[in-house]
Structures are given as C-alpha cells and as structure tokens.
Image (cartoon, helix red, strand yellow):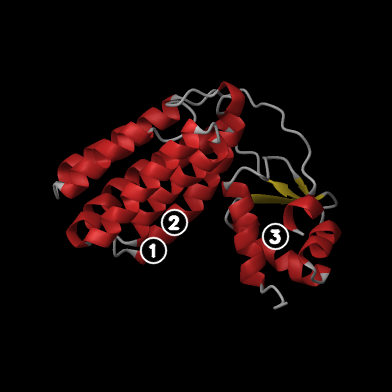
C-alpha cells in the first residue's frame, strides 16, 4: 500500500469537511488522526497548521485542534467576499468555457438533484460547492480560484452551523438551489456574462438569507472510523 502524502491527508480531511462528516467543533486529536491515517504524529501537525491558515481548523494553545465554528460576522463576511469575486469568475468562465466544461456543470446539477431526491443533503451541499468550484477552476484566474476554494470550505462549515438540520431541510433551503444553478447554466450557455453575473450575485444573497444563526448540536465523530 502506497504511503499517504501530506497532500493526501489534507485532501481527505477537506473532503470530510465538505461532505459534512466533520462537523464544526469536532476535536482533532493528533494521535488519533495519526493512527487513522497510518502515519506519525509529526506528519499530522503541518496539515492542521495548513487548515488553520485557511481558517477551516482552529488551533488553541494547550487545547489542540478542532474544526472551526464560524461566527455570524465571519459567515456574513464570507458571503460578502463571494459576491465580490464570483460574478467576475463566471464572466471569465463564459469567455473560455468549452462544451465539456458546460457538460460538467450540467452533471453537477443532475447529481445534486439526485442527492436531494434521495434525502442526502450532505452530498447535495458538497455537489453544490463543486458547481461553483468548477466555474472557478476554468475561469482562467488562478488567484481568485484559490481564494474561492478556501471560501467554499468555510461556506460548508457555515451551512453545517447555521442551516436547518438535514432531516428538516426543504429541497430548496439547505444549499444552493438547483433551480438557481440551472438559471445560471442557461445564461452561461447563452454566453451572457452580464446576466450570469447578476444571477450569481442574487444566488449568493439568497443563500445567505436562508441562514439561521442558532447553532445546532451534532453527534461526536469517531476519527478512526472516518479515516482508517
């Protein structure tokens, strides 16, 4: 079995966060993570520092690491910044998007709809983020793309903290609405950057408006079971 690289560990942890398998506040015990990943503890620390620099993990002296719990102000700032950069990213995407790029967005929407129909809201939220990241990854602006990737991870934490519990979530209320993604896709297919930018901005405003700033409790997460 090929040993995991630091990047592998990082990506698996980010995936667990985006998939809502690591809720906000989860304690990240270094020894348990090292055992789960089959590496030494010294390999875990740099990954946690990297996640802390991206504001996804909180490192507290004498208390260790935990998944960040964003405040209401932080949540609103994340959406404010997303509204600043994502209209630009979608405009740039339109100028260079290939048929394959547009087909990938279509698949994201279909998969998200299927996840919602199956009641798998955690997967739906992950696919919703993938839709936005695909646009960023093919917009031809690496710097904004990196910024958005961090913001999408933080958005996932915000949705976990401030959205309705998954078993109560309505089809259109927990994550980016599929209908709004379809409207965006239509503007992209028409190569209408101004309309796509407007729809993106309104879409993010609506997503923020659905947040309820009353955190809910999540059950404890078994790191060994999750990563081993």
Q: Quadrant of residue 172?
A: top left
Give the percent coordinates (x, y) of residue 48.
Answer: 70, 60
Give the percent coordinates (x, y) of residue 204.
Answer: 37, 36
Give the percent coordinates (x, y) of residue 140.
Answer: 29, 65
Instruction: Give the vertical position of 53 relative to 160 (above or below).
Output: below
Distance from Cα at disc 1 to Cα at disc 3: 22 Å
Identify the image quadrant of the C terminus: bottom right
Viewed as shown, does residue 182 lie left or right of 67? left
**Which mark is first along the chain, 3 or 1?**
3
Viewed as shown, does residue 75 lie left or right of 49? left
Label number found at residue 155: none
Q: Secondary structure at mark 1?
A: helix
Which is more toward the observer, 79 or 29?
A: 29
Report which residue position mark 1 lands on. Answer: 143
CB within 8 Å, label 1 to label 2:
yes
Residue 95 visible to the viewer: yes
Label number found at residue 48: 3
Q: Secondary structure at mark 3?
A: helix
Which residue: 50% across, 54% down?
Answer: 150
Which residue: 55% across, 31% down?
Answer: 72
Which residue: 48% across, 49% down?
Answer: 151
Q: Secondary structure at mark 2?
A: helix
Label number found at residue 147: 2
**Within-10-Å neighbours for mark 2: few <14, some 14–19, many 20+:** some
**Which mark is first along the chain, 3 or 2?**
3
Which residue: 36% across, 31% down?
Answer: 205
Viewed as shown, does residue 84 lie left or right of 93? right
């Amino acid at each position: 079995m090929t040993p995991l690289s630091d990047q592998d560990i990082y990506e698996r942890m980010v995936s667990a966060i985006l998939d809502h398998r690591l809720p906000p506040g989860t304690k990240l015990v270094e020894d348990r993570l090292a055992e789960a990943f089959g590496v030494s503890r010294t390999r875990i620390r740099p990954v946690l520092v990297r996640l802390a620099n991206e504001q996804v993990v909180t490192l507290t002296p004498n208390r260790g690491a935990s998944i960040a719990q964003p405040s209401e102000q932080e949540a609103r700032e994340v959406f404010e910044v997303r509204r600043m950069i994502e209209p630009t990213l979608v405009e740039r995407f339109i100028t260079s998007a290939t048929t394959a790029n547009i087909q990938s967005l279509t698949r994201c929407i279909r998969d998200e709809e299927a996840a919602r129909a199956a009641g798998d809201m955690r997967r739906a939220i992950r696919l919703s983020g993938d839709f936005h990241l695909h646009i960023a990854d093919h917009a031809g602006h690496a710097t904004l793309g990196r910024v958005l990737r961090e913001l999408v991870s933080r958005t996932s934490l915000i949705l976990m903290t401030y959205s309705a519990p998954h078993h109560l979530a309505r089809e259109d209320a927990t994550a980016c609405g599929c209908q709004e993604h379809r409207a965006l896709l239509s503007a992209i297919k028409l190569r209408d950057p101004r309309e796509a930018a407007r729809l993106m901005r309104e879409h993010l405003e609506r997503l923020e408006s659905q947040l309820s700033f009353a955190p809910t409790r999540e059950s404890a997460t078994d790191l060994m079971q999750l990563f081993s």
